[in-house]
Amino acid sequence: MRIHHVFFLIPVITLCASQAQENPCHCKDKQAPHRWRFEEKHETNFSRYPEVKDTITCRDIIAWQERFRKIKKIISPHSSQQPRVKGTPEDSLYTLRGYMYFVRHESQENGDCDFHIEIGTQNKSDMRAVIEVTNDSCSVQKKILDYVVSKGYSLNKEFSAGVPCVVSGLGFYDGHQKKSKHGRPGITTMSLWELHPVISIQFK
């Protein structure tokens, strides 16, 4: 009796562990340049602004809310073309040291293509300030995205630990919205002040 050997070929599927990410430079803001204070948010001539020598923390940005409370009379949702206000943090370039805990990319249908980032202290439960990286600096956005992924984190999701960083950007008052709706409730709703736009970030 002849025995026939039958061999079954089982395909081997190799799963790729790397996380595919969309290049933020491909994002397009369909409402530009008609957004509120668009030119101020997208400033690119940073040589016009003096650089503050001392570094700041998120607590300094939060404190601007009370210190410069009168700015609400100058900048409101009705002052859409208001230029940067002299004598306030809007006319200076700052260096911020802190810990990055959350990054959201406004890439949805009506998004402005910015990276909204929360910067806090080493204590994860402390209040945080908001910084924004516009699509004008999509290379900086990509640097952030690549670093976040390399640490095993994802966009739109709270990090398990803060990522030490140093950020450079212009002060900006986001008076287009109510303080209670600025960012995520209970985390970044203490101040409408931001660094916006951010021009550089370094990870430590």
Image (spheres, grey):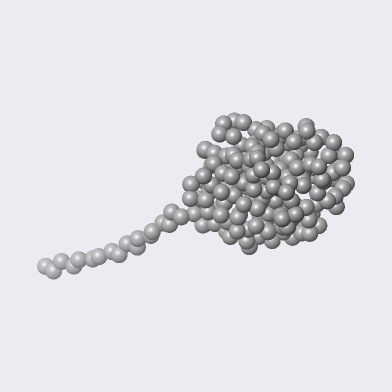
The image quadrant that residue 119 belongs to is top right
- Relative to 88, say whether 115 is above or below: below
Q: Position of residue 73 (x, y in %)?
A: 88, 39
- Relative to 78, say whether 43 is above or below: below
The image quadrant that residue 172 belongs to is top right
Q: Is residue 64 visible?
A: yes
> Which residue occupies 64% across, 44% down?
95
**Is 20 positioned to the left or the right of 10 in the image?**
right
Q: Position of residue 134 (x, y in %)?
A: 68, 54
Q: Is residue 157 visible?
A: no
Q: How many marks?
A: 0
Q: Nearer the viewer, residue 1 or 88?
A: 88
Q: Residue furthest front?
A: 53
> Which residue occupies 58% across, 56% down?
142
**Is 140 positioned to the left or the right of 10 in the image?**
right
Q: Position of residue 140 (x, y in %)?
A: 60, 55
Q: Position of residue 170 (x, y in %)?
A: 71, 48
Q: Residue furthest left?
A: 1
> Which residue occupies 20% across, 66% down?
5
> Which residue occupies 57% across, 31% down?
123
